[in-house]
Amino acid sequence: MADIGVVLLSAGSGRRMNSSVPKQYMDLCGKTVLRYSIENFENAGAVKAIIIVTAENMINDVWNNYVKPYNYKKVTQIIAGGKERYHSVYNGLLAMKGEGVDYVMIHDGARPFAREDMINRLYEKVKECGACIPAVPSKDTICVADKAGNVAKYPDRSFLWNVQTPQTFCYKAIKDAFDIFMKNEKEYYPVTDDAMVYKRVTGKEVAIAMGDYNNIKLTTPEDFDIAKRIVENE
């Protein structure tokens, strides 16, 4: 049964990409980054609805140039984002209310390689645990710096994971958590991802499901070079 909704975040800029075009609308081997992201979920059997969150002035453009020409059946809404990422997430969660889903995935549109096998792992895990994130074990040694910029300590790498999206939750639980968070932003701020909001507000555990080392976020020109190699090797 298809009972997952996807909040696909596509309101970012191309600032660190040194581009006047937002990264999600840049070309990657003949297809825009956003199209890769849409199609990953469009083709996933467990997904029922996709809501794209973009800049307000891009809504019509996204409909007319990135959705309609490709006949994506699962994109049900395109809505405006907010000032911060968590505002955009909340707008997406509010819009998801009428889609009749039990679970929701929150995904960065600039991650074009969220494959169906990972989506299915997250789906199985969220049904078991109620909240989960995709992550991969850190390959690098990580140090913690002090205020002077010196090495303060080395955490045990066996406990360090690189967090990815789509972060996946029971819809009602994450919506309720964001309701509380948005009324008390200063109390919980800063937060850097959706699982942090969920954990801080509810105190409940967030499980880790194995992500994918290819599930990279495109942030810099170097990331695009890596993404091109991934596409070419498929």
Image (cartoon, rainbow, N blue to C red):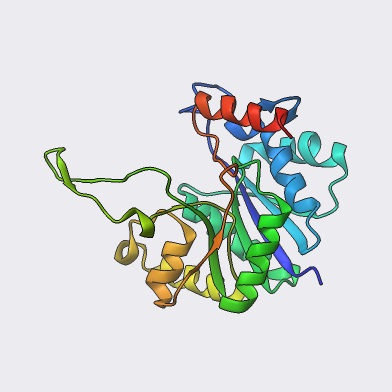
Q: Is residue 80 left or right of residue 116?
A: left
The residue at 56%/58% (across/down) is 210
Residue 152 appears left or right of 32: left
Left or right: 55 with respect to 154? right
Position of the N terminus by quadrant: bottom right
* Quarter where residue 175 is shown: bottom right
- Residue 182 visible at all: no
Taking the spot 11% from the left edge, 39% from the top edge, the residue there is: 148
- Residue reaching furthest left? 148
Question: Where's residue 207, x and y in %?
Answer: 50, 69
**Image location of residue 20, percent across then percent down:** 55, 22
Residue at point 57% right, 76% down? 130
Visible residue check, residue 114 = yes
Q: In which quarter of the image is residue 30?
A: top right
| Residue 200, x across and y down, in percent | 37, 70
Q: Which of 82 and 8 is in front in this view?
A: 8
Between residues 101 and 125, which one lies in front from this camera angle? Answer: 125
The quarter of the picture where the C terminus appears is: top right
In the rendered image, residue 37, in percent from the top left (x then y), is placed at 69, 44
